[in-house]
Image (cartoon, coloured by chain):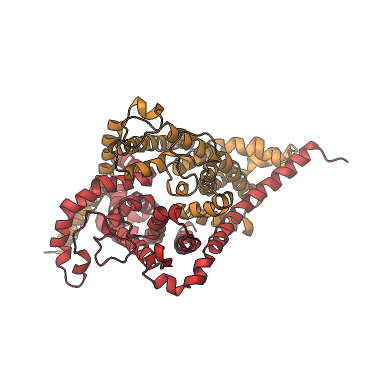
Chain colours: A orange, B red
Amino acid sequence: MDAIKRRKLINSLILVLSTLAALFGLLWLFWILGTLLYKGLGSLSWEVFVGDPPAPGDNTGGLKHAIVGQTIIVFLATVIGIPIGILAGTYLSEYGKGSRWANFVRDLSDVMMSIPSIVVGTFVYAIMVKPFGHFMGLAGSVSLAIMMIPIILRTTDDMLRMVPPELREAAYALGATKFKVIKDVVYRAAITGIVTGVILSVARIGGETAPLLFTSFNNNFFTLNIFQPMASLTVTMYDYAMSPYKYWQDLAWAAAIILTFGVLGANILGRVIAHYKFKK
Amino acid sequence: MAKSRGFWADWTFGKVAALSALLVVVILIALAVVLYGESKLAIKTFGVWKFITSTVWNPPMNKFGGAPAIFGSVVSTIISILIAVPVAIGVAIFLTEIAPHYLRTPVGVAIELLAAIPSIIYGMWGLFFFAPFMRDKLQPVIHATLGKLPLIGQWFEGYTPGIGLLTASIVLSIMILPYTAAISRDSFKMVPDILKESAYALGATKWDVMKDVVIPYAKLGVVGGVILSLGRALGETMAVTFVMGNQPVIPHSLLEPATSITVTLANEFTEADTDIYLSSLFYLAFILFVMSFFVIVIGKFLFLKKVER
């Protein structure tokens, strides 16, 4: 066989192999998604959203406590995480530009972004749950906020650096203070990017379970008290899926699909905004 | 002249922003210090080398050794990388070189969205669907093929309910696949078209271009991406907790139940009733933190930094 034929043969072989690899990868992933849709949609009902927590062995009840708990925990996490993340990102881009300290903080925040989420959970357990002696919803929010800050910091930093310096200089020339320049010029120019970053970070932490296991823990009752253990969709899913009751396992699948739709919805929203923003 | 309101707003904002940046550093340092402080009791009692090599994890006897958990974390990470990386690179080649243009965006977006699915979903799917599939369909195949190999054959023996180290590794590999694929694709995309076109103009086939132009050019990015995926697999909790089996032993066969650092933490942390038990768990968390810290630093600063420049 001559060289050209051999090369062509190897080429076709590799192309077929990598197409197969793509199909193989997608196959698993769509199996998971299909399962989720099949089991989840089958378990969804009005009762799931409004019902009180189920009693063991009972076939009624819903996830109201977990949905509300999840919303509170994630909301508080954003309240803590967004200002710190945005301000720190602003510092890196506007104040510490190019300085060694800013580069160091940027690198550390990249490292922080990849710390295993369960390690963050153990850390917050040590600083909040142990001193107070009991699990609490707020501790869950703090762990999620710790995971959010580096993500928001990074996107804010990137977005602000994309704002052309001429805009800032024009504002300075009019006698504006640095704060005014940042607030009225830089933030305005970069707002879509920052919002996108925030939404994507919420999508990222909204589905986290591990940092909540030892912080907000779980609560089989409806509560609004953030200083008490608080149910979340993810931890409830974990407990219910591992339980022996068929109805609880069904509820876990219902929670799974609510959570996934929430997280994917936020993710797609962020992408759509980014898409329209950067197409122009 | 009195300082105006504008001055104070400006001054405060600058200070608050600087403090926020400082806070990031403080959190990371506090995390390391607190984890070390909490695990001090266990470090004193069991030592470093003894803890890492001791295979006894016996809470009622207050004897704790980290070897089974560390073994499980390292082995499941390695297996998942071995499975995920070739497939991910296949996906990346497919997305950048083979797929028709109208397929590239939807398939690419689909893969990125799959990376956004919460890991607990992978875990639940693993427990309810993949573990039975493993027990009924894959296990006999593995026995008949890999189990017959010399030397490594014994790693694939035994009958289990489908939950074990290998099951967890496979679920883990599916979990990190979209992540690895996305990074590889982005690295491949950074290869300038003109380089590829020059190679094509010389009569190269697609595979020649991949092998001699794209992969050498994107090598650092792909390796960095693989190392970051490794860090992710190491710290992944929920996807493996459901299917690992939580047996604190070093299994004889990959099909048997085992444990890992994250699985041990997720299962036992809230049940630790003695100080030394809790401290040993913190010790494991600290070890995981140190391991992933080095993995991230190597991946990010040794490989990906070079790509950016």
Q: Position of residue A134 (x, y in %)?
A: 53, 47
* Image vertical order of residue B122 relative to residue B276, above or below: above
Residue at the far left: name it. A1
The quarter of the picture where the N terminus of chain A appears is bottom left
* Image vertical order of residue A264 relative to residue B126, above or below: above
Q: Which quarter of the figure has residue A27?
A: top left
Q: Position of residue B93 (x, y in %)?
A: 29, 52
Q: Nearer the viewer, residue B105 or B249?
A: B249
What residue sits 58% from the left and 59% below the top? Answer: B29
Q: Nearer the viewer, residue B34 or A59?
A: A59
So how many labels did they put on this image?
A: 0
Q: Position of residue B145 (x, y in %)?
A: 14, 62
What residue sits 36% from the left and 69% below the top? Answer: B55
* Image vertical order of residue A252 relative to residue A210, above or below: above
Determine if residue B5 is in view.
Answer: yes
Determine if residue B203 is in view.
Answer: no
Q: Which quarter of the figure has residue B187?
A: bottom left
What residue sits 16% from the left and 52% below the top? Answer: B137
